[in-house]
Amino acid sequence: MRATLIHGTRDIRLEEVADPTLRFPTDAVVRVVASCVCGSDLWPYRGVQPTTEPHRIGHEFVGIVEEVGSDVRTVAPGDFVIAPFAISDGTCRHCRHGITTSCEHGGYWASADKQGVPVDGGQGEYVRAPLADGTLVATPGQPDPALVPSLLTLSDVMGTGHHAAVSAGVTAGSTVAVVGDGAVGLCAVLAARRLGAERIIAMSRHADRQAVARLFGATDIVAERGEEGVAAVKDLLGGIGADAVLECVGTKESMEQALNSTRPGGYVGYVGVPAGGPELPIQKMFSSNINVAGGVAPVRTYLPELLDDVLKGSIDPGRVFDLELPLDRVADAYAAMDERRAIKVLLRP
Amino acid sequence: MRATLIHGTRDIRLEEVADPTLRFPTDAVVRVVASCVCGSDLWPYRGVQPTTEPHRIGHEFVGIVEEVGSDVRTVAPGDFVIAPFAISDGTCRHCRHGITTSCEHGGYWASADKQGVPVDGGQGEYVRAPLADGTLVATPGQPDPALVPSLLTLSDVMGTGHHAAVSAGVTAGSTVAVVGDGAVGLCAVLAARRLGAERIIAMSRHADRQAVARLFGATDIVAERGEEGVAAVKDLLGGIGADAVLECVGTKESMEQALNSTRPGGYVGYVGVPAGGPELPIQKMFSSNINVAGGVAPVRTYLPELLDDVLKGSIDPGRVFDLELPLDRVADAYAAMDERRAIKVLLRP
């Protein structure tokens, strides 16, 4: 079968690799129906995270179960399944608290499990899915093909935007500002609307992304950044920061933007993978009671409730995909996202 | 009248100063019944915060209203009042959100108001209390003198411990660890018990403080620190960190202790004044969803509910005072706390 490997900075290749097989009784093999490129895939693509040797890449996919191991109970061949970006057993102490990304037996796609056994990436034709019962979520029956993009967002970006909103305590009537207009930021806007926020300020300088933000429920757009951006947010909110600021980028600048846009006592809900590890300024946080919550999103935990909303049509996060390419053009998909020609690219094997 | 000034490192003096008078129609003048020394007063005492010129000190007191300005409505001469450690109007945008420590018109005792007008310290015989309606809380009638120590803790340490617990989301059934066995840490134990925590691990190496922690509701004591302390906490909690860790010190070491003792998805509620400004390690927080909430405690907001509990006897935070001295021995009070001969010292003019 064919799967995507990264060889180095801006070097993405689709190559022939061995077909996956069941390796453990808890495995499933999934035929990929759609996958995509994540903003976090751009860190190694751009060389911000160095690639020392070629390896598989991709951690968002949906597909059809082909085979299951003898211990698998919750999914069966023929099921349409969504794979969250982290593998989890659903039963360990951390999973029981809902933090599936800290699963004691789990791991990540395109990586290795806790015993060092390689795990497939999602940007390929087939994937061995470890801990299938804990990890995969099957839809009730075969979904309408038109829903595939939205279902695919439940792998990562919609659940991640939702985690930002939940971590920041967004609730009915909240004032919210969203830093970052990538797919996660846009999904965070949608998540905030879904949770009942009254004002949702999307910070974006790009007309196409502003349009999606409006569609997802943004009540206001702020194009300025830095101090001007903070001032614009406060102008919209009667002179104080937002109750909840959703940080969906992961840079030092975006975190500063978020901290400075939060009112005393408010929350920054952050899900941007910290790039380069900016540390948080505790003195500023302390003096104004700016709280910081979030992290790598346990999207598996949120998947059932978000899936319900996608299936009944009350949310349509698949609109973040503005480009669709065949898998053999995966390198073009990375380039389009890197150059910000596309918000998010869907790949079909 | 006499009031306390700090002249430099370990140089505390009781001196004659001008009697306070009503300066604004929103002022009250309060005769101090009891005041005390705060752990944060030890930072300038020890020279960690330099003292460039002699100034008033002290920010926790209770007393009797002597006089009120023409605009004061909620307190009257003869009332017994509790002064929270921050001055607030109770009406500004931040006060309406409950963050009275960020009051747009407030300030701190032993400092200056937003217009630069000096504000008295609490370790004296009388105090001019600005924004008396917003700041001061009167008890219903004259309290039993035996309750004075507990009422005095509502100025700061009990409300601050409570803020740590609230910020960390302590609720019925929570597992809690408390870092710091000063008066705030001990009050945090009491606050966690009051909020229904199931397990409360007090981290303390001092028998006298351990005894108060037990009295306040600690179910377990951990004397170890650092990695051994983390391991001991996890041993008590089935191998994972606590749901909520209350950081009540403010040093780099204590914050690390707190972050490492929290389970994935849990909260550090921190109220220790950051000494020297350790920054927070965002990569560690991100990968395990360790959330950090808290800051300078808006104790005024919590005062009514905590006051109710003190008056009905369901909490007795005054037990943190293990030494009482006349005001003219204020220098001895600082020395006793600095040398950890006392947990907290109550001063009577």
Image: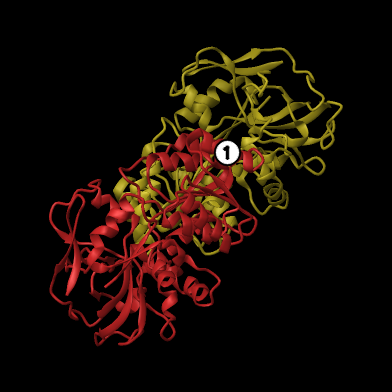
Chain colours: A yellow, B red
Q: Is residue B342 above or below residue B150?
A: above
Of B96 and A333, the residue lying toward us: B96
Report which residue position mark 1 lands on: B232
Decide if residue B122 is in sight here: no
x and y, in percent, of residue A220 in the image: 44, 56
Q: Is residue B283 above or below residue B313?
A: above
Decide if residue B30 is in sight here: yes
Work out which residue is located at the far right of the displayed protein and give it: A70
Q: Residues within 10 Å of mark 1 (few under 14, many from 20)?
A: many
x and y, in percent, of residue A246 in the image: 48, 48
Q: Is residue B248 left or right of residue B171?
A: left
x and y, in percent, of residue B227 in the image: 51, 33
The N terminus of chain A: image quadrant: top right
x and y, in percent, of residue B274 in the image: 35, 47
Of A48 and A348, the residue lying toward us: A48
Q: Is residue B38 left or right of residue A52?
A: left
Residue in view at x 76 percent, y 31 percent: A132
Number of numbered markers: 1
The C terminus of chain A: image quadrant: top right
Q: Is residue A207 left or right of residue A323?
A: left
Q: Is residue B105 left or right of residue B171?
A: left
Residue in view at x 55 percent, y 20 percent: A331
Q: Is residue B335 above or below residue B156?
A: above
Circle 1 — which element? helix
Q: Mark 1, chain letter? A: B
Of B271 and B217, the residue lying toward us: B217
Q: Amino acid at mark 1?
A: Ala
